[in-house]
Image (cartoon, coloured by chain):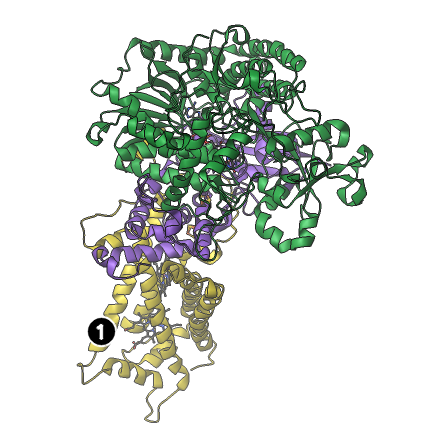
Chain colours: A yellow, B green, C purple
Amino acid sequence: MAQATELRRGAEAPRVNKGVSRRAPWPVQFYESAVGKKWVMGLTGLALYGFVFGHMIGNLKIYLGREPDGEWAIDAYGHFLRELLHPLLPNHVFVWLLRIGLIVAFVLHIHAASTLTLMNRRSRPVGYQSSRDYIAANFASRTMRWTGVIILAFLIFHLFDLSWTGTGQDYELGHVHDNMIASLSRPWVAAVYILGNAALLVHLFHGIWSSFQTLGLNNPRWNGARRLVSLGAALLVGIPNILFPLLIVTDVVT
Amino acid sequence: MTLQLDSNVPAGPLADKWDNHKFDLKLVAPHNRRRFDVLVVGTGLAGASAAASLGEMGYNVKVFTYHDSPRRAHSIAAQGGINSAKNYRNDGDSVHRLFYDTIKGGDYRSREANVHRLAQVSVDIIDQCAAQGVPFAREYGGLLDNRSFGGAQVARTFYARGQTGQQLLLGAYQALARQIHLGTVTLYNRMDVLDIVLDDDGKACGIVTRDLLTGETARFSGHAVVLATGGYGNVYFLSTNAKQCNVTATWRAHRKGAAFANPCYTQIHPTCIPASDEFQSKLTLMSESLRNDGRIWVPKNPDDCGKSAGDIPEDARDYYLERKYPSFGNLVPRDVASRNAKTMVDQGHGVGPLRNGVFLDFADSINRLGESVVRERYGNLFDMYERITGENPYQMPMRIYPATHYTMGGLWVDYNLMSNVPGLFVLGEANFSDHGANRLGASALMQGLADGYFVLPATIAGYLADLLGTSPVPTDHAVFDTAQTEVDDRVKRLMSAKGTRTVDHYHRELGRIVWDYCGMARNKEGLEKALSEIPALREEYWRDVKVLGDGRTFNQSLEKALRVADFMEMAELKVKDALHREESCGGHFREEYQTPEGEAQRDDEHFAYVAAWEYGGPDIQRDSVLNKEKLVFENVKLSQRSYK
Amino acid sequence: MSEMLNLTLKVWRQNGPDDGGRFEEYRTTVADDASFLEMLDYVNEQLVAEDREPIAFDHDCREGICGSCGLMINGQAHGPQRGTATCQLHMRKFHDGDHITIEPWRAGGFPLIRDLAVDRSAFDRIVEAGGYITVNTGAAPDANEIPVPKDVADAAMDAAACIGCGACVAACPNSAAQLFTSAKMQHLNLLPQGQAERWARSEAMVETMEEFFGSCTNHGECQEACPKEISIDFIAMMNRDYLKAKLTNRRRIGQRKVG
Ligand SMILES: Cc1cc2nc3c(=O)[nH]c(=O)nc-3n(C[C@H](O)[C@H](O)[C@H](O)COP(=O)(O)OP(=O)(O)OC[C@H]3O[C@@H](n4cnc5c(N)ncnc54)[C@H](O)[C@@H]3O)c2cc1C
Ligand code: HEM
Ligand code: HEM
Ligand code: SF4
Ligand code: F3S
Ligand code: FES
């Protein structure tokens, strides 16, 4: 960039991104670049989608009531998860693998998200002084950061609520069903859940579509379908997730 | 005659001249090239291709443009295409035919040897551009497509949609960008070149610039200076040229001693959108290719001119080009088409709200080919027309009128593209070389790239070789002091005039004079009128122009003011040249000299020469000195152009 | 047939990079067949008559091809008409009594020069980084020795139509230059001639771009603002090429068909 100095005569253009360290191993270089980070976001985003989808399916068991042996179906499912691949692996190991994968995905996704957000801030030091009139950018796309943060906040609450300590309801590790009912039947908790999952829905509506672009999955033949696919995928997870708290707080499920 | 104008055309048969010459030229060895500093002014097709090629060869190049990016040069606007004697169509084209057509098209007022060389290298240009990734139109087999353009009877025009100039320029710009990245070329964008500097023994040794962002003036010195600064069409104010096109660099060189050749040769393009009101800032060209499928007509009866075209029955229409020129019809050369449009409008057949246009009608083609085919061919042009006029050309005919488009005149150069000032090379539209008195369509792009890619890189070595070991004149030398002071004074004078009228006002005034008396058709009386009006206007300009702000900042009015000041002088020389050339040829039509059918009547006996004007002093019409370079035609027979 | 429009303009005025800058309001009356820039010319004439400095704005060709012009008009880059550069916008798109707000492009990579003029040199830096095909003058084979399927040539032309105006950056909420960069890159990456340098090019251009501009959240706003209606499909292609660029072993490319 010998020539970059030609900008001297105007104001200096801020160096928005520190650039890629040429000698580093390629994965590092790749992640240092914004396009690389977007790839990571796209991939982790889809992985996370995989999780929330599976998670939602699992949670449907709440509707199955008790097993013949009198155990709540969803509790059984909890045990099943913990003992999955046993005796190939000792108990809990597989869930932990899942969890680790999950944690890694979240961490990367969030790290990339926040660094890119900062980069974009730097890239427009002085904003428009009159109001913009957007044509394509929609609510979902412009609020990714916020919906993302809401999801994160929800997640932390949610982990305390149903996996770790409970949030005031009489909580007992392993008794998934009772914990859930106990917790979600409290209106404010239900509200938190609905909000969190509404945010997820919106996040995914743009997120899935966006990941197609980011991952270069782009072909005039089916580009038209991409919006619908992402809407469908978002609803597929969002609606059931919102129904859980709704049905529980309204005592439809007990 | 005080100048020695030696065209340096090499001896030998026409077809071998260029190869022989290249062999005879001195060379500069690769390891010596970086010892030479070359200043290239202009990043259009000619400038960018020259700077890139010189950079590749290893010269030390500095390139200047007033644009913010090299890619914005006016070449970007060229739509139609570029000619090349590839004969991919097997329709009988050849280097010699391209040469012949160009000489004839120029109405036998150009230099045989240059034109033939142009036709020869035209073949390499297409190869070079295709390799650079210029997305030329292709056929389904993947090979290059051609079309016939500007009245040529062979299909030798290569094109990239309606954006040929843009794509060719991007190719040259990208080659230039590569050299900038490699450090062989340094780019100075937003830099106005305001004077050319000659050393004590009259060789070009540098330039004085004004940084458009900071207003600072500065000096640059080099072993040679290359001007590729485009044409002077904006002397008319309204033209198809980009708003910033100007004559400053070449005019300043002229004042320093470079001969200005044939300033009266300007091309008026037949298919432009007529002016709509007095706010009009520029005229827009509609590609000539439209004439392939559009029919030009006016109402026979002036009373019909108010009516909308649909209400005018077939037999009340005068398809005047088809009537007068049965064999070429609507495809006659530009000068002929333009002049006929003027005649029609002058006789009161003009159409449109201001009665200042003729119809270009696609109804027949739409019936014959179907709207979809027409849309496929001209869609973007039709959209452009509708955007500007608010009329839909699929439903009603277009209205067109001629506008200034290209300037064949320019600084005089020899076969090596060097002006009579040693070390000052001139390329592209800025020189006078190849188009004689009229340019054929799709040949300016060809010339710009020929000059820049293939001719200059060879010929400049011949000049530089003798300078090996010398270093450029230091910029603190007295010649630079005087030049820079002169520039600073000019800026001060304009800033301190503090008059009452804007620069644009005076530019419009000048344009009106030049258009009325030295436009499509000229006569003695009118030209003399112009010669009396221009100096008066110029005097008033310097006294009364109003330039606000500060000379030491980004000041666009000042930029314009400096340019208009030079147009004011150049215009006078242009008119003087038109007055002295008592014949009609190509774009220069003197009403006194026409054939019974109203065609241009050449006078080969007295005027088969290049009029190279030498600057004699501030009173242009009194002091300018005429020098003649006789044009010798050994390979073509001069004949009256007939397109009947 | 041309009618007059009375307009109220709110124009950003700023004496230089270091000046604060502010909106100023002007009233004017122009014919509806004037172009937007002719309207500004006219306002400038009025200003000068009142001894006020004219509004600085970049322009040249005034037919939508040089890419010099570019204004944020009522919050839209290049104004309300799709596929149109500011200079091609005509006043008949507006109505009598309209209020029009005019702002310069805003982006860190486009430092403001004065009033409505900005410095877009950063685009040149991106092209210099790799937006070319290395072929020295004279080294080219016959043009027809490299056949290019028509569809490929057309696709390349779609990308090559970019005029470098910067509206994509201006319109992008992240001021990302993805559309420009991908257009310049894919023009060459699509063509057979461009394959030899494809991966080096993709890497260099993306990484240079990211020194000046933001990142892409796929808002798609750029595509709407683009006067040449360049598609964000090229951004997806660029993302793919960038990954491949990092993955491919360039010393082995000869063994595989590239792209
Ligand atoms: C609308 C239109 C359509 C055309 N269509 C065709 C066509 O289809 N086919 C064809 O063959 N020809 C066509 N032409 C003609 C052709 O485009 C031009 O003749 C040709 O591009 C000129 O190129 P150039 O490099 O000589 O000059 P330009 O492209 O005009 O470049 C001039 C350069 O010099 C620089 N410059 C000038 N003065 C100064 C200064 N004082 N200081 C610093 N820099 C300076 C400018 O910044 C610019 O970079 C067309 C012309 C127009 C107007
Ligand atoms: C289960 C939870 C989540 C899922 C399924 C998910 C999914 C996705 C997907 C698929 C994308 C599109 C990526 C791309 O454009 O290629 C995305 C983008 C994004 N995500 Fe998430 N995400 C989740 C959680 C989060 C969290 C917790 C945050 C932040 C705290 C976050 C912030 C973002 C942001 C800012 C983007 C836009 C990035 C950009 O394009 O610039 N997401 N998300
Ligand atoms: C209404 C919707 C939801 C319900 C009813 C729900 C329910 C539950 C329950 C009952 C558990 C405990 C499982 C166990 O301990 O075996 C759990 C764990 C978890 N949930 Fe949810 N969840 C919902 C939404 C979400 C969302 C949107 C996310 C992600 C953003 C999420 C992430 C997690 C995680 C990470 C765990 C911990 C899993 C583990 O311990 O391995 N949940 N959820
Ligand atoms: S991509 Fe479109 S908007 Fe962006 S610079 Fe090119 S032409 Fe302008
Ligand atoms: S608007 Fe911006 S976010 Fe991407 S798709 Fe266009 S660059
Ligand atoms: S002025 Fe050239 S694109 Fe608008």
Residue A218 visible in the snapshot:
yes
Residue C253, x across and y down, in percent: 25, 58
Numbered disc 1: secondary structure = helix
Residue at which label 1 appears: A96
Q: Nearer the viewer, residue A254 or C229?
A: C229
> The C terminus of chain C lies in which quarter of the figure?
bottom left
Query: Is residue C117 left or right of B333 when viewed as pictured?
Result: left
In this rendering, is residue B215 above or below A168?
Answer: above
Q: Nearer the viewer, residue C105 or C225?
A: C225
In this rendering, is residue B77 above or below A40?
Answer: above
Query: Is residue B116 left or right of B532 when viewed as pictured?
Result: left
Q: Amino acid at mark 1?
A: Trp
Q: Nearer the viewer, residue B22 or B561?
A: B22
Q: How many discs appear?
A: 1
Query: Is residue B506 left or right of B323 when viewed as pictured?
Result: left
Q: Nearer the viewer, residue A63 or B543?
A: B543
Residue B45 visible in the snapshot:
no
Residue B389, x across and y down, in percent: 65, 39
